[in-house]
Image (cartoon, rainbow, N blue to C red):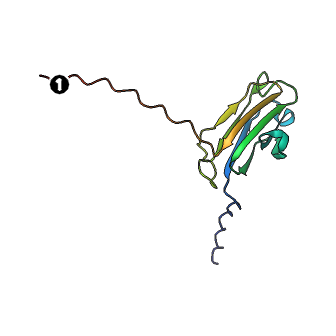
Amino acid sequence: PPSPPPSPPPSPPPFDCTYFRLDIVADSFTTTETSWDLYVEPREKSAVLLQATGRSGNGCLPDGRYRLSVFDSQGDGICCKYGDGSFAVTVAREHNTRPAEDSPPILTGSAFGALASIIFTVPYLAPPPSPPPNPPPSPPPFP
Protein backbone atom coordinates (compact mmCIF):
# COMPACT_ATOMS: atom_id res chain seq x y z
CA PRO A 1 0.00 0.00 0.00
CA PRO A 2 1.17 3.57 -0.62
CA SER A 3 2.73 5.55 2.23
CA PRO A 4 0.58 8.20 3.91
CA PRO A 5 1.41 11.76 2.89
CA PRO A 6 3.90 13.55 5.15
CA SER A 7 2.52 15.73 7.93
CA PRO A 8 2.36 19.42 7.05
CA PRO A 9 4.87 21.66 8.82
CA PRO A 10 3.57 23.51 11.90
CA SER A 11 1.76 26.75 11.15
CA PRO A 12 3.76 29.90 11.81
CA PRO A 13 2.51 32.15 14.60
CA PRO A 14 0.01 34.84 13.57
CA PHE A 15 2.54 37.62 14.27
CA ASP A 16 6.30 38.07 14.34
CA CYS A 17 7.55 36.73 17.62
CA THR A 18 10.64 35.36 19.31
CA TYR A 19 10.51 31.85 20.74
CA PHE A 20 11.40 31.63 24.41
CA ARG A 21 12.38 28.48 26.32
CA LEU A 22 12.81 28.10 30.08
CA ASP A 23 14.63 24.91 31.08
CA ILE A 24 14.48 23.88 34.73
CA VAL A 25 16.87 21.28 36.12
CA ALA A 26 15.29 19.95 39.28
CA ASP A 27 16.77 19.81 42.74
CA SER A 28 15.23 17.17 44.99
CA PHE A 29 12.02 19.20 45.47
CA THR A 30 11.60 21.30 42.29
CA THR A 31 8.39 19.62 41.21
CA THR A 32 6.61 20.62 44.40
CA GLU A 33 8.39 23.80 45.51
CA THR A 34 9.33 25.67 42.34
CA SER A 35 7.05 27.72 40.13
CA TRP A 36 7.56 30.52 37.65
CA ASP A 37 5.72 33.18 35.74
CA LEU A 38 6.44 35.50 32.85
CA TYR A 39 4.79 38.80 32.08
CA VAL A 40 5.34 42.05 30.22
CA GLU A 41 7.35 44.56 32.22
CA PRO A 42 6.24 46.67 34.09
CA ARG A 43 4.38 44.00 36.02
CA GLU A 44 1.69 46.21 37.53
CA LYS A 45 0.29 46.85 34.04
CA SER A 46 0.41 43.28 32.77
CA ALA A 47 -1.33 39.95 33.17
CA VAL A 48 0.72 36.77 33.44
CA LEU A 49 1.59 35.45 29.96
CA LEU A 50 3.02 32.05 30.91
CA GLN A 51 3.32 30.17 34.19
CA ALA A 52 3.93 26.68 35.54
CA THR A 53 4.83 24.76 38.68
CA GLY A 54 7.81 22.41 38.76
CA ARG A 55 8.48 22.19 35.04
CA SER A 56 10.04 23.89 32.06
CA GLY A 57 8.06 25.93 29.56
CA ASN A 58 8.14 27.81 26.29
CA GLY A 59 6.21 30.28 24.20
CA CYS A 60 6.47 32.85 21.44
CA LEU A 61 6.82 36.46 22.57
CA PRO A 62 6.26 39.66 20.60
CA ASP A 63 9.11 42.16 20.75
CA GLY A 64 9.20 43.80 24.16
CA ARG A 65 10.51 43.80 27.70
CA TYR A 66 9.66 40.87 30.00
CA ARG A 67 10.08 39.84 33.63
CA LEU A 68 10.65 36.20 34.53
CA SER A 69 10.12 35.32 38.18
CA VAL A 70 11.15 31.92 39.56
CA PHE A 71 9.72 31.16 43.01
CA ASP A 72 10.73 28.62 45.65
CA SER A 73 8.04 28.07 48.27
CA GLN A 74 10.56 26.87 50.88
CA GLY A 75 12.88 29.85 50.34
CA ASP A 76 15.97 27.74 49.59
CA GLY A 77 16.20 28.17 45.80
CA ILE A 78 16.92 25.20 43.58
CA CYS A 79 20.60 24.82 44.41
CA CYS A 80 22.55 23.62 46.41
CA LYS A 81 21.30 22.30 49.76
CA TYR A 82 18.98 19.67 48.22
CA GLY A 83 20.66 19.08 44.85
CA ASP A 84 22.15 21.03 41.99
CA GLY A 85 19.09 22.50 40.31
CA SER A 86 19.20 25.45 37.93
CA PHE A 87 17.20 27.33 35.32
CA ALA A 88 18.17 28.74 31.93
CA VAL A 89 16.37 31.04 29.49
CA THR A 90 17.09 30.62 25.79
CA VAL A 91 15.59 32.69 23.00
CA ALA A 92 15.71 32.28 19.22
CA ARG A 93 18.03 34.56 17.29
CA GLU A 94 15.43 35.21 14.58
CA HIS A 95 11.69 35.83 14.60
CA ASN A 96 9.42 32.82 14.14
CA THR A 97 12.19 30.23 14.58
CA ARG A 98 12.79 28.00 17.57
CA PRO A 99 16.05 28.24 19.53
CA ALA A 100 18.58 25.64 18.43
CA GLU A 101 19.21 22.93 21.01
CA ASP A 102 22.81 24.12 21.35
CA SER A 103 21.94 27.83 21.64
CA PRO A 104 23.59 29.37 24.68
CA PRO A 105 21.16 30.66 27.31
CA ILE A 106 20.79 34.41 27.72
CA LEU A 107 20.03 34.08 31.45
CA THR A 108 20.78 31.43 34.08
CA GLY A 109 20.23 31.04 37.79
CA SER A 110 20.27 28.53 40.61
CA ALA A 111 21.27 29.79 44.05
CA PHE A 112 18.55 32.14 45.26
CA GLY A 113 16.19 32.30 48.22
CA ALA A 114 12.45 32.52 47.66
CA LEU A 115 12.56 34.53 44.41
CA ALA A 116 14.79 35.10 41.39
CA SER A 117 13.42 37.88 39.20
CA ILE A 118 15.06 38.80 35.91
CA ILE A 119 14.17 41.34 33.23
CA PHE A 120 15.07 40.64 29.60
CA THR A 121 14.19 42.02 26.18
CA VAL A 122 13.23 40.28 22.94
CA PRO A 123 14.50 40.31 20.37
CA TYR A 124 17.58 39.58 22.42
CA LEU A 125 20.54 41.61 21.29
CA ALA A 126 23.79 40.08 22.43
CA PRO A 127 26.40 42.55 23.64
CA PRO A 128 28.72 43.56 20.79
CA PRO A 129 32.02 41.71 20.66
CA SER A 130 35.01 43.43 22.18
CA PRO A 131 37.15 45.18 19.59
CA PRO A 132 40.48 43.52 18.88
CA PRO A 133 43.45 45.02 20.68
CA ASN A 134 45.32 47.72 18.79
CA PRO A 135 48.21 46.31 16.78
CA PRO A 136 51.66 47.39 17.90
CA PRO A 137 52.96 50.45 16.08
CA SER A 138 54.93 49.79 12.91
CA PRO A 139 58.65 50.41 13.13
CA PRO A 140 59.76 53.62 11.43
CA PRO A 141 60.94 53.22 7.83
CA PHE A 142 64.67 52.91 7.20
CA PRO A 143 66.30 56.17 6.01
Residue at 85% over, 40% down: 44
Where in the figure is residue 32, as x and y percent of width and height? 87, 35
Observer-nearest of 94 and 102: 94
In the displayed structure image, the side of residue 99 where residue 53 appears, left or right: right
Q: Residue furthest left?
A: 143
Q: Dot 1: what SS?
A: loop
Check the picture and name the quadrant holding the C terminus. top left
Q: Amino acid at mark 1?
A: Pro
- Front position in the image: 79 or 28: 79
Location of residue 21 (image quadrant): top right
Q: Residue 110 or 27: which is nearer the viewer?
A: 110
Residue 27 sits above or below residue 89 on the image: above
Q: Which residue is mark 1?
A: 141
Q: In the rendered view, would you say 35 is above or below 136?
A: below
Q: Depth check: give the residue in front, 43 or 12.
A: 43
Image quarter of residue 122 = top right
Across and down, in percent, residue 19 comes to: 67, 50
Q: Is residue 9 above or below residue 65?
A: below
Q: Is residue 54 visible?
A: no
Question: Residue 142: x and y, percent?
Answer: 14, 23
